[in-house]
Amino acid sequence: MTGYLCLENGKTFIGEVIMDEEDPVQGEIVFFTGMTGYQEVLTDPSYKDQIVVFTYPLIGQYGVNEDDFESSQPQVKGVIMLQSPALYSHYHATSSLKDYLKKWKIPFMTGVDTRQVVKAIRDVGTQNACISYTESLPEKEKLTGQIEKVALSQIRKMGSGNKHIAVVDFGVKKSIVSSLVKMDCLVTVIPYHQLELLDQMNVDGLVLSNGPGDPKEMMSLLPKLKEKIMEIPTLGICLGHQLIALALGGNTERLLFGHRGANHPVIDNQTGEVFITSQNHNYVVNGASLTGTGLEPRFMNVNDGSLEGLQHISKPILSVQFHPEARPGPEDASWIFQQFYQTIKQPGREKMYA
């Protein structure tokens, strides 16, 4: 059935829409530049309440399987594609992408000129949009509260091993926890609103997870986060990276249209190596705000020069704006987990906190 994608700035695009609701479905519109990885994107909690435009012209060709979910259900508000085939081909697949979206009642559109939609986003910036059967402009209000919708409500333990890592859950992806478990670690995932549990735990390392939305919605947590990251070797990923900067006195700012895709080049200032990363974020750390924080830029985005990661000058604190778990995306950055693991194994590291 013919439907409309209407942007906050007044631009409208026509396509074929499938949705259960008669009323418009609104979300923040963003675009993803990877050729593959749509299943991971749809279930990544960091995409909560967003309408995702896939730039690759054919989405769904290898179907949906039971292994590549990043959470128990889709997190996106809607999906925009040029084409999505009914037939799929992969030995792990159990359903088509269209059937999967229908099952979870996620509105989607095909036949949309996704190139023009992306141009509109790049020109004006990330904005609200709605999918509907009639032309209807979305509200201009800022979406908030996404972290509360996706984070765990109770503690969870996974894996085993001599090293114990606590993951603070702001919307953690399954593959981040799996990457830590594979290093033979006991992993305890803690809801972000129960940070006091860290006072009762003996952990070797701390991971601040990814998550949706503006990191400044978590300002009330910064004093406790600062206390813990100055006590425990810490790795921050995406939102977690931003929270480390805020907790130690830095600042964050919003990008015009964010970085989303599995093909973003990043340079390591320490080694000069360039590697390809998977990314999904609207906000970045302002490098000029780091004076006096003890944090130094470690990684930079090759395309636009934005800050992609931090390292503390004296404490074992490392943060990355990209996703080292590489789902979706290349595995170029998976060594970040190993570097973090070596940090918590380092003999005499406890002297660093004396």
Image (cartoon, helix red, strand yellow):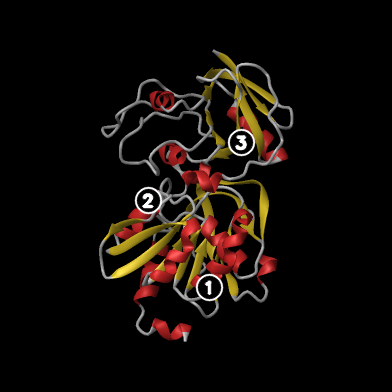
Q: Position of residue 254 (x, y in %)?
A: 67, 51
Label 1 to label 2: alpha-carbon separation: 27 Å
Q: Nearer the viewer, residue 116 or 145?
A: 145
Residue shown at the point (66%, 76%) measured from the top left: 292
| Residue found 46% across the figure and 83% down from its top | 352
Q: How many marks?
A: 3
Name which residue type carries label 3: Ile
Q: Is residue 198 left or right of residue 268?
A: left
Query: Label 2, on which residue?
Result: 175
Foreground: 41 or 272?
A: 41
Q: Is residue 186 visible?
A: yes
Q: Which mark is residue 29?
A: 3
Image point (51%, 50%), residue name: 211
Circle 3 SS class: strand
Image quadrant assignment for residue 131? top right
Which residue has dot 1 on it? Answer: 227
